[in-house]
Amino acid sequence: MGDQPIVLFDGVCNFCDASVNFIISRDRAGVFRFAPLQSVAGRELIEKYSIPADVDSVILIDNDRAFIHSDAALRIAQRLGGVWKLLSLFRIVPRPIRDWGYKLFAKNRYRLFGKKDSCMMPTPEIRERFLA
């Protein structure tokens, strides 16, 4: 899987799908790789990094470490660079407070944005950035 950061995401969540597309469109260098949590690769990484079963939103694997909740989101923003890097300033907010807000949003994401019956199918142009 290499040294590139991997974003694990809920493949049936409309908001998560939009977030992956957001990252792809801003990651011009093609640094990030992606895998739905529901995929074989996603499940293998969850097991490898001993990620708790109740984590069902974005996870970032970077430099052989797993980041969850707000840490994952802020690190992704930082890696995107540009103006998005400024979001990393939210790290000054204590993690329990950041994670509380993150978990509240994640808990309601299906109700707010909906859910699909299956994971997204990447376009041929970006398919190589997705793990099987």
Image (cartoon, grey):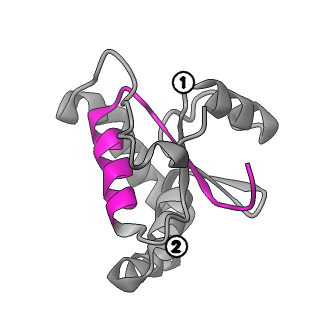
Secondary structure under badge 2?
helix
Left or right: 62, with 78 as reference point: right
Visible residue check, residue 2:
yes
* Disc 1 to disc 2, C-alpha distance: 24 Å
Secondary structure under badge 1?
loop
Q: Residue at x 33, y 83 (%)?
A: 83
Residue 64 belongs to magenta span: no
Q: Residue furthest front?
A: 124
Kind of residue sitting beneath label 2 = Arg
The label number, if any, that marks residue 38 in the structure image: 1
Nearer to the camera, 103 or 114: 114
Name the spot of residue 43 as percent of width and height, x first.
66, 27
Name the spot of residue 47 as percent of width and height, x first.
76, 31
Visible residue check, residue 93:
no
Nearer to the camera, 9 or 108: 9
Kind of residue sitting beneath label 1 = Gln
Q: Residue furthest top?
A: 117
Residue, disc 2: 79
Q: Residue at x 65, y 24 (%)?
A: 40
Dot 2: few (<14), some (14–19), or many (≥20) neighbours within 10 Å? some
What span is in magenta?
1-25
Query: Which quadrant of the figure contains the C terminus?
Result: top right
Left or right: 48, with 125 as reference point: right
Q: Residue at x 45, y 82 (%)?
A: 89
